[in-house]
Image (cartoon, grey):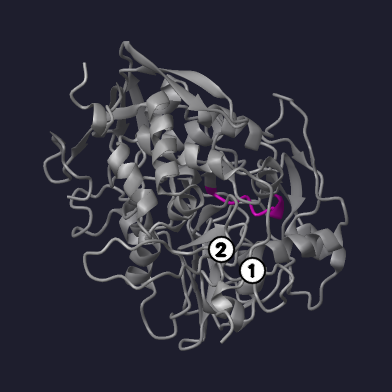
Amino acid sequence: MPDVYNWQLGRSMSYPYEERHPDRQFAFVFNINRCIACQTCSMACKSTWSWSRGQEFMWWNNVETKPYGGYPHGWDSKLLSMLEEVNPKGQVWGYQDDKEHEWPYGSFEGKTIFEAAERQRIEPQSSRALGYLPSEEEWRAPNMHEEVAHGPLQEKGDRPGTAQLPEHRVWYFYLQRICNHCTYPGCLSACPRQAIYKRKEDGVVLIDQFRCRGYRKCVEACPYKKSMYRPTTRTSEKCIACSPRLEGKDEQITPDGMPIETRCMSACVGKIRMQGMVKVEKDGTWAKQPEHPLYYLIRERKIALPLYPQFGTEPNGYYIPPRWVPRPYLEQMFGPGVKSAIEQYSCPDRELLAVLQLFRATQRVLFRFAIDKGPKVGEIEVTMPDGKKKTQEIYNDTARGFDAAGTEVARVTVEEPTWERPAEHLNSI
Amino acid sequence: MGEHPKDRPAEPADPLKMMAGGVAGDPGLMLDCMVEEYARIGFGEAQILELFESQEFLATHGLRNLFGSDGTRDRVREVLSRCGVMRVTTTVARPESQSLCQGTHPDA
């Protein structure tokens, strides 16, 4: 297999195809800290793209409860176990703080799904990535056994007493998942028909429905299990990054032709999502764009991290890790950058706080931001990862977001921190 | 009649149930962080408490069950007394006019 460079792993790796890169790459950041699993994103996606016959169990966007659940069930723990079996105790990161190299998280010393398949010499030869085909049972219920609430039935207008969740007495968090539109997609590598391709203009990974014969090699090889088989058409389908919205060609959706966020992003009521398109150099590295909100969050500050980078597909979905979750679990999921990401996010400086306010400020895809600095307006105390408190300075700064044409489309001003007087002291002086 | 199976405690070793096992962690820290998150985008005490009281939001409601209604309210107040509620103003452009209009909902 040819060697390609994977900047998330800090090294070259084997991949079935030669290295080629799009001009721009669709990417996104999800802030896990703020998600309360309202599932509005899941329904927005489903009601747009996967509501037909044969798509009943197809959730291109799903939100699952970690560490308890997954869709399909146990998708990540299964693959992690398979990798461990191929390379026992070898799936580790060797961290070296070396500014000369393109390795923001260190260098991964273990085996990717492609290298593990090589080592395994998996038969048949068309299996170019280590993976497995989930059973129908595993696809059947996206949130099965994650949260089974039960309590008294409510009457109209009632606020019910309690819902029982006996199994979740400890921490947990929600993981929002769509296709990562990987730089080195497992699905694309495995397709014996070469029906899967990555678009040059935005790096979106698509399945050509006319070429697909439904062999399900993509379902088997995608480590994130985001390629799904549809029995009624006998083809596989997957998230298309709402490409009509992204292209800005539909006058009904984008009258001025500017890229608009995907359905799942634009429906997010918790304002946890931000998407964008980053410029990619010929060698696959991201062009330096410190004023691009995604570049800033992912490459400059490194507070948003890729999901299971060790799989080796260079996913383009990034997550701000939850602050309350034990580190070993998060490090397995997001790599060694977790500690620094959480420390920065827990007590953001003025620039980071301003950029974070741009999440879901507008439906337009933002290509640039600027900050107008204002005076200091207060200090607040925030909780750090170790539970200790730290003082955060608040400034009256304004973050401005610009669309693809360079027009200002959103402006968010941090006015000041305010304190509410409890009801019993409302009239106190 | 014995107890209903749904009322029995989860058994991690039950091979037919993908039930949660205990993992070390601090639900109090989880609650504090969630309150700070929503205060950061301008949610006040009443709005934040609604997230905990409503059964629709199982994570926050689960924490409310763990700490009790009064305990949750006290803890939310304690966090808000430290971090306050951020007042934020958002202004967005309408696609057709390109002019900035204050207070416009982004989906309008």
Q: Do the residues indicated by labels 2 and 1 lie within the same chain of the protein?
A: no
Q: Chain of mark 1?
A: B
Of all chains, the one bearing label 2 is A
Q: Are marks 2 and 1 in contact (CB under 8 Å)?
A: yes
Identify the residue at horizontal 45%, vertical 63% (top origin): A61
Classify residue B99 by image quadrant: top left
Q: Residue A212: horizontal and vertical position, in percent?
A: 53, 79
Q: Quadrant of the N terminus of chain A?
A: bottom right
User: Can residue A347 be seen here?
Assistant: no
As helix, strand or loop, the secondary structure at mark 2 comes to loop
* Left or right placement of residue A193 versus residue B58 in this view: right
- Front position in the image: A428 or B57: A428
The percent position of residue A153, horizontal first and vertical second, equals 34, 73
Closer to the camera in the image, B86 or A168? A168
Label 1 sits on residue: B10
The answer, for residue B18, to whether it is visible in the render is yes
Label 2: how many residues lie within 10 Å, few (<14), some (14-19) or many (20+)?
A: some
Q: With respect to residue A25, does A209 lie above or below?
A: below
Q: Which residues are magenta?
A: A310-317
Q: Is residue A298 left or right of residue A11?
A: left
Q: Which residue is mark 2?
A: A166
